Amino acid sequence: MRRTAGRTRYNRLVDYVVKHGAALRGGVTVPGDKSISHRAIVLSAIAEGRSRIRGLLRSEDVLATLRAFRQMGVAIDESSDGSVTVEGVGRDGLRSPAADLDLGNSGTAMRLLAGLLAGQNLSATLTGDESLLTRPMRRVAVPLERMGARIATSADGRPPLRIQPGGRLRGIRYRMPQASAQVKSALLLAGMYASGETCVEEPAVTRDHTERMMATFGCGCRRNGNVVCVSGGGALSGVDLDVPGDLSSAAFFIAGGALAPGSNVMLSGVGINPTRTGVLDILERMGADVRIENRRSAGNEPVADIHVRPMPLTGVEIPAHQVSLAIDEFPAIAVVAACAEGQTRVRGAEELRHKESDRIRAIVCGLRALGIDAEERDDGMDITGARFKGGTVDSFGDHRIAMAFCMAALRADGPVVVRNCDNIATSFPGFVDAAARLGMDIAVP
Ligand code: S3P
């Protein structure tokens, strides 16, 4: 098996060859937000009546969630106008699936479904690809068991997750050891099926899409500081929803526009939920010219257009409290940091080791392969800005590592080969086309 930071063995490796020295110019609309798309399917499936979702992300991860609900008896229709109609089966209407639910590469799908299914009177096995099978699941299984769920992980706390019908769940108060929106969301979903109140305390702010969307469907949570609570027994009603563009996908072009001389990029219709915008704050502190224009809202989420132009960049300290606000953007931030004057230090980011790859290791390996001085720390990294040379970077099968290092080519002395890019399809299926529209030259065999 070829890896140190990643987890997957691949039969088929697709490498991208990115020509160096382009500028990003023009506008693109990035596809729908992945986190919001998963939640839109989950909540519309258990609502009473029909929901219509516009702008749903059609990536491999989200399609895995969609297939899982079809396996549990939910009728989901994909219309020719691009919208998706979900015929909700009501809070107790899901059926035990006849086969395992294969959630592919998606940690979000697995953890959200663990919470939702823990409260149902059904049996299901949640499994996934080789990467997902290595990801930690005790963080959801332990609190769900405390609520009374019957849920088993493998001996070392990994998937598959086997869920059995249990009695009625009991509400708990739980302080999460990690700042995780996936764990919080799993417990809130289970809390809808529990007696009394379920309260989750977060050690740092995490994305609040579940809370916002539960309110849209008519089952609100209450927040008091860093504690969010839901009462059991609520019912959801079907709605029409618009999914904003994914800031985590836009982040690659924001990074590219900030680091490539001569760039001028406009990203339209991007979600700017304040629990996600750490990347914008960090890049602005580095000196990037990132402007938020035309603020509006979609589906109870704030949305805007983001205009980016390059400026001289300076390295920064990224404090621990900002990490959860930019948790998925560190690959893109690291590539920008490598183009900045001086050092960028990231601390308090141990969670990055538990993503689709060990992202601390994958980022540092990639930066070094392109001639940058980067050091791994247990809970972060130090990056000293310089000039990228051309070279070959391994993505370790991680979509975000792959897309971030495509951007490095914009400021490199030679072409950059990014190995193992298949999994870009898990979050951003049109990435190569969008990059080409902005002026990048990516050769895909
Ligand atoms: C997500 C939450 C984050 C993030 C992931 C999506 C979500 O994970 O990294 O890509 O949709 O809730 P954690 O909550 O585990 O940090």
Image: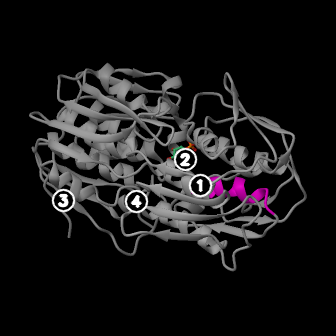
Residue 120 sits in quarter:
bottom right
Q: Does the magenta-highlighted stretch encompass residue 418?
A: no
Report whether 294 appears left or right of 188: left
Report whether 23 appears left or right of 248: left
Residue 164 sits in quarter:
bottom right
Tell me, yes or no, whether the two marked residues, 3 and 2, touch with CB atoms within 8 Å. Answer: no
For mark 4, what is the residue?
397
Classed neighbour count for the residue bearing mark 4: other residues with Cα under 10 Å, few (<14), some (14–19), many (≥20)? many
For mark 1, what is the residue?
135
Spatial distance from mark 1 to mark 4, Cα to Cα?
Answer: 14 Å
**Disc 2: residue Cβ within 8 A of ligand 1's nearest atom:** yes
Q: Is residue 223 visible?
A: yes
Classified by dominant secondary structure, the portion drawn in magenta counts as helix
Q: Who's the residue at 70% across and 43% down the image?
A: 219
Query: What's the mark number on residue 354?
Result: 2
Mark before the other along the chain sequence, 4 or 2: 2
Mark before the other along the chain sequence, 1 or 2: 1
Q: Nearer the viewer, residue 176 or 364?
A: 176
For mark 3, what is the residue?
17
Dot 2 amino acid type: His
Dot 1 amino acid type: Arg
Mark before the other along the chain sequence, 3 or 4: 3
Q: Is residue 177 above or below residue 248?
A: above
**Disc 3: residue Cβ within 8 A of ligand 1's nearest atom:** no
Spatial distance from mark 4 to mark 2, Cα to Cα?
Answer: 14 Å
Q: Is residue 156 visible?
A: no
Mark 1: which secondary structure?
Answer: loop
Q: Who's the residue at 46% across and 51% down the image?
A: 34
Spatial distance from mark 1 to mark 2, Cα to Cα?
Answer: 7 Å
Mark 2: which secondary structure?
Answer: helix
Give residue 257's position: percent from left, percent from top: 20, 36
Give residue 258's position: percent from left, percent from top: 22, 32
